[in-house]
């Protein structure tokens, strides 16, 4: 059995004048189906570059990325992306932005069903009633909710999220983290599944498991709350510095988690790795 995602000896080099700049070098790790993995590293270490390769938006210079054992050759409907910077179409309403994603992913679904599904997913992210607004009429946090709703609505096996809450204020960030956590953890209970299929409401969808998530962040608390494992990247060029399992039971609750045994110790270790030793001597 292949892992859902495998990154093998990945190198990415960019042209820098007449020289080459190595953004990633010999990066290898894998992600199991249904696993939530965070990639952490300081600014410029190559996190977006890595996610771009997984999304098929950027090509490897060496090694490669594999989904279900097959090399990534371009974007595909098996992967939904939430970009680092707001990436809604400004000329479309929130609902139409989500419906557009659905149109791509669920060909054959009639327009009315697409609109209903878009409204349903906006509801999941707490934006019921905001579907007719344009991105310019929404706050940053609301825009990012729409982007998340669009990604969820595409119902891809894999979610690639590039610092989705990085530009959101602290309070909304906390709310959105908990929203994502509950949607993802609730998948087994039918929360994270598609309400409508080509054949109408589907029982089969409700039995499907959690999405496989690669979540880029530079926030250790965020990574600890959400992830099953943290992949730490060192800087210049980015390499896998350490992989740290995060074994706290699920479903997780922030208040309980931060009080739980081992939390403070793991947080301290991660912070020390991140701020003190990170990348030194590599
Ligand atoms: N298209 C490009 N051409 C040349 N250099 C690039 C290009 N994209 C990224 N880089 C360089 O590659 C390195 C990694 O960039 P990347 O955007 O992947 O970092 P990051 O870890 O996502 O940073 P941040 O946390 O700030 O988003 C940086 O030094 C950046 O300047
Ligand atoms: Mg980035």
Image (tube, rainbow, N blue to C red):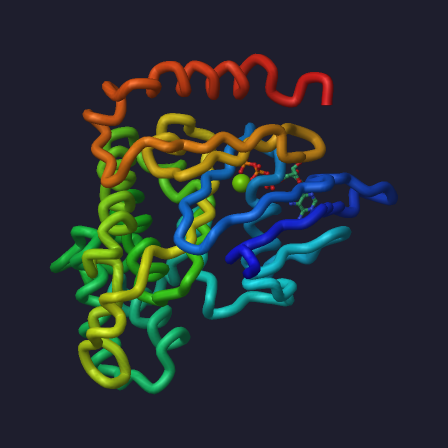
- The residue lying at 52 percent from left, 69 percent from top is 76
**Image coords of residue 230 (percent x, y):** 48, 34
For residue 245, what is the image quadrant? top left
State left or right for residue 162 relative to residue 125.
right
| Vertical position of residue 227 compared to residue 153: above or below | above
| Vertical position of residue 145 compared to residue 208: above or below | above
Q: Residue furthest left?
A: 129
For residue 208, what is the image quadrant? bottom left
Residue placed most toward the observer, 155 or 30: 30
For residue 96, what is the image quadrant? bottom left
Residue placed most toward the observer, 167 or 178: 178
State left or right for residue 196 relative to residue 148.
left
Quarter holding the C terminus is: top right
Quarter holding the N terminus is: bottom right
**Image coords of residue 169 (percent x, y):** 30, 32
State left or right for residue 29 relative to residue 85.
right
**Image coords of residue 222 (percent x, y):** 36, 32
- The residue lying at 26 percent from left, 83 percent from top is 111
Total numbered labels placed on residues in the image: 0
**Image coords of residue 199 (percent x, y):** 24, 85
């Amino acid at each position: 059995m292949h892992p859902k995602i495998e990154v093998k000896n990945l190198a990415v080099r960019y042209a820098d004048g007449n020289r080459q700049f190595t953004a990633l070098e010999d990066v290898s790790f894998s992600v199991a189906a249904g696993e939530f993995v965070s990639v952490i590293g300081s600014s410029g270490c190559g996190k977006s570059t890595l996610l771009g390769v997984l999304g098929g938006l950027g090509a490897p210079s060496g090694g490669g990325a594999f989904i279900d054992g097959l090399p990534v050759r371009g974007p595909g409907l098996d992967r939904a992306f939430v970009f680092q910077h707001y990436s809604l179409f400004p000329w479309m309403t929130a609902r139409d932005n989500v419906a557009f994603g659905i149109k791509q992913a669920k060909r054959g679904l009639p327009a009315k069903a697409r609109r209903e599904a878009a409204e349903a997913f906006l509801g999941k992210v707490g934006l019921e009633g905001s579907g007719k607004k344009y991105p310019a009429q929404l706050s940053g946090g609301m825009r990012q909710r729409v982007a998340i709703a669009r990604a969820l609505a595409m119902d891809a096996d894999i979610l690639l999220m590039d610092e989705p809450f990085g530009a959101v204020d602290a309070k909304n960030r906390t709310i959105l983290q908990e929203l994502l956590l509950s949607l993802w953890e609730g998948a087994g209970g039918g929360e994270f599944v598609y309400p409508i299929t080509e054949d109408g409401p589907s029982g089969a969808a409700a039995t499907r498991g959690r999405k496989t998530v690669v979540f880029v962040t530079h926030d250790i608390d965020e990574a600890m709350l959400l992830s099953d494992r943290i992949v730490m990247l060192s800087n210049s060029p980015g390499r896998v510095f350490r992989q740290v399992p995060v074994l706290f039971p699920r479903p997780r609750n922030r208040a309980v988690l931060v009080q739980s045994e081992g939390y403070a110790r793991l947080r301290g270790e991660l912070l020390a790795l991140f701020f003190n030793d990170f990348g030194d001597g590599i």
